[in-house]
Amino acid sequence: KNEVEQSPQNLTAQEGEFITINCSYSVGISALHWLQQHPGGGIVSLFMLSSGKKKHGRLIATINIQEKHSSLHITASHPRDSAVYICAVKNFGNEKLTFGTGTRLTIIP
Amino acid sequence: DTGVSQDPRHKITKRGQNVTFRCDPISEHNRLYWYRQTLGQGPEFLTYFQNEAQLEKSRLLSDRFSAERPKGSFSTLEIQRTEQGDSAMYLCASSLEEVGNEQFFGPGTRLTVL
């Protein structure tokens, strides 16, 4: 079973700050997802990546396969970025996702 | 709206009652997944379908839980004889195998068992 750890568990920052959320996993994977969950429960997929780096607007996701580590960065953070960010991995030969417990991000105006 | 939809969004029931949730995946998505999320935790896998075939079930899915996808489109998740420990958010996701299998999530059904 893949263990997925996220850090920090909670993060509070001022508007405009550069945010980094980390995800580590224990065994090899075929893909890693970064997800965003707002209060009320709905989950939005931000990125799916298996190597390198992806960028969408102010969001950047990177993955280092050798180190079994991924980071999600938010540039010029805004209060509307406040949400829980969840890392999830898909193992080889297995369709289910294994999730981290999430990072609760609060951006203060 | 062509996203994943779930119904109902909220369900409050008394212990011992049966409940059924529905998930409508994105049209043409052949894979459908059910996850459960308890407060403060990340989601946990319950089961998934490829078309109408249920291909994997988690040990979390006790014999009180049953999921179906009879025509390979929408799916239902039924919980019989609900217990307070069943209180959670039940999430559905769908994906298209041929396009990298990225999963798209629905808004979830929040179940409260009194």
Image (tube, helix red, strand yellow):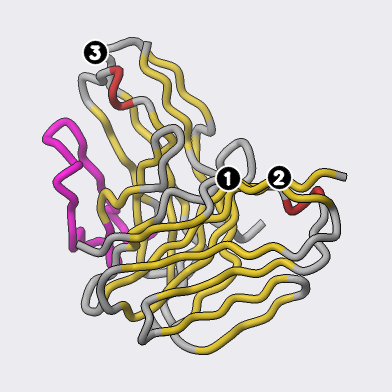
Q: What is the quadrant of residue B112 in the picture?
A: top left
The residue pinned by badge 1 equals A10
Q: Give the number of the mark in front: 3 or 2.
A: 2
Disc marking residue A78 = none
Is residue B39 at all visible to an observer of this figure?
Answer: yes
Please say if the residues under marks 1 and 2 sit with CB atoms less than 8 Å apart. Answer: yes
Q: Which mark is residue B16?
A: 3
Residues A21 and B46: in front is: A21
- Across and down, in percent, residue B4 comes to 53, 55
Left-right relation of A55 to B87: right
Mark 3 is on which residue type? Gly
Q: Nearer the viewer, residue A50 or B98?
A: A50
Residue lying at 54% horizontally and 60% vertically, measured from the top left: A35
Q: In this view, does A85 lie above or below A38?
A: below
B47 versus A69 height, above or below: above
Marks 3 and 1 in Cβ contact (< 8 Å): no
| In-front residue for pair A34/A18 | A18
| Within-10-Å neighbours for mark 2: few <14, some 14–19, many 20+ | many
Which residue occupies 24% across, 13% down?
B16
Q: Position of residue B14 (x, y in %)?
A: 34, 10
> According to the image, label 2 marks what residue?
A106
Q: Where is residue B30 in the image (x, y as percent from the top left)?
A: 37, 69
- Dots 3 and 2: beta carbons under 8 Å? no
Check the picture and name the quadrant holding the N terminus of chain B.
bottom right
